[in-house]
Amino acid sequence: MQDIAFPDLTEEQKLNPKVRAKVIGEFSPLIKYIASRIAIRLPPHIDLNDLINAGVIGLIDAIEKFDATKQIKFKTYAEFRIRGAILDELRSMDWVPRSVRQKARKVEDAYSRLEYTLGRPASDAEVAREMNVDIDSFHKLLSETASVSLLSLDDLGENDADLSKRNLLEYILQDEKDWPSHKIRYAEVREIVARGIMGLPDKERMVVSLYYYDELTMKEIGHVLKFTESRVSQIHTKAILRLRSKMQKLFKEIGQ
């Protein structure tokens, strides 16, 4: 897919229905791909078409707000807006039960406490002991909370009311002058996130890399690593909860 040459378009042209129709037509496969990728891990009652429609709204938003002077490719910006709109739609559905969110937060807090004390990634057995459950119950808990990690790196600030509309990619794409705090620049955030990912245990780092950078599905990752799809999902959930516990602190600092 070639990048749209928006630097040559006026603001009036961006709002032109024909221009929008052309861009939507060119980006419709991407919208369907992003929506389908997210839908894989959703309950069956979530309609894929609803997610695709939300993605179209995100693309239109991207057309209206794209600023070529920031030297960001439109395709990159559009992907961000499409994914963000779909996640907003999911949040509005409130499809993850409160009890599941609470369980996920308890696991996240356990990781945070242990890794602060130990100075290294905590093992499954250590987290299970910290939570006063046996290892089988801990693994079951990871499976139950896998849905929370769907929002994953796109929604690391969701537990903070004042940061509920923030996500990682937005911080990376924002210009420094637009930041709520000048204490931490976007390049520093990217570096901290990279360090957080590199600090994950090997299997978790591999799953994150294959899922987010190589864009493989959980099933495809299972084939690569010779794990079951459910095992890959557990590893992904652990990785995201570890990262969330680290990034929550960072986002709170940025919001101050």
Image: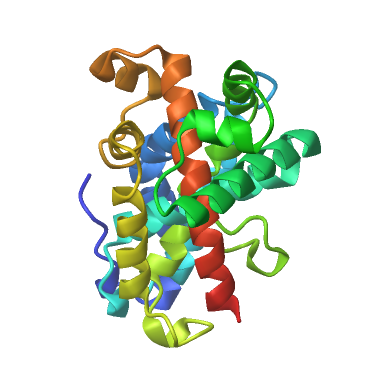
- How many numbered marks appear? 0
Residue under the point 63% across and 66% down: 163
For the C terminus, give its image quadrant: bottom right
Colour mode of the rendering:
rainbow
The location of residue 171, given as percent across then percent down, is: 44, 68
Q: Residue furthest right?
A: 98
- In which quarter of the view is residue 4 placed? bottom left
Against 94, residue 59 (above or below) is: below
The location of residue 50, given as percent across then percent down, is: 63, 35
**Is 190 on the left-hand or right-hand side of 96?**
left
- Is residue 16 in view? no
**Is 43 on the left-hand or right-hand side of 254?**
right
The location of residue 93, given as percent across then percent down, is: 74, 40
Against 149, residue 48 (above or below) is: above
- Is residue 25 in view? yes
**Is 174 on the left-hand or right-hand side of 128?**
left
Residue under the point 29% across and 80% down: 69
**Is 68 on the left-hand or right-hand side of 253?**
left
The location of residue 49, given as percent across then percent down, is: 59, 30
For the N terminus, give its image quadrant: top left
Please tell me which residue lies in front, 143 or 68.
143
Please tell me which residue lies in front, 238 or 77.
238
Residue under the point 65% across and 61% down: 164
Please tell me which residue lies in front, 126 or 176.
126
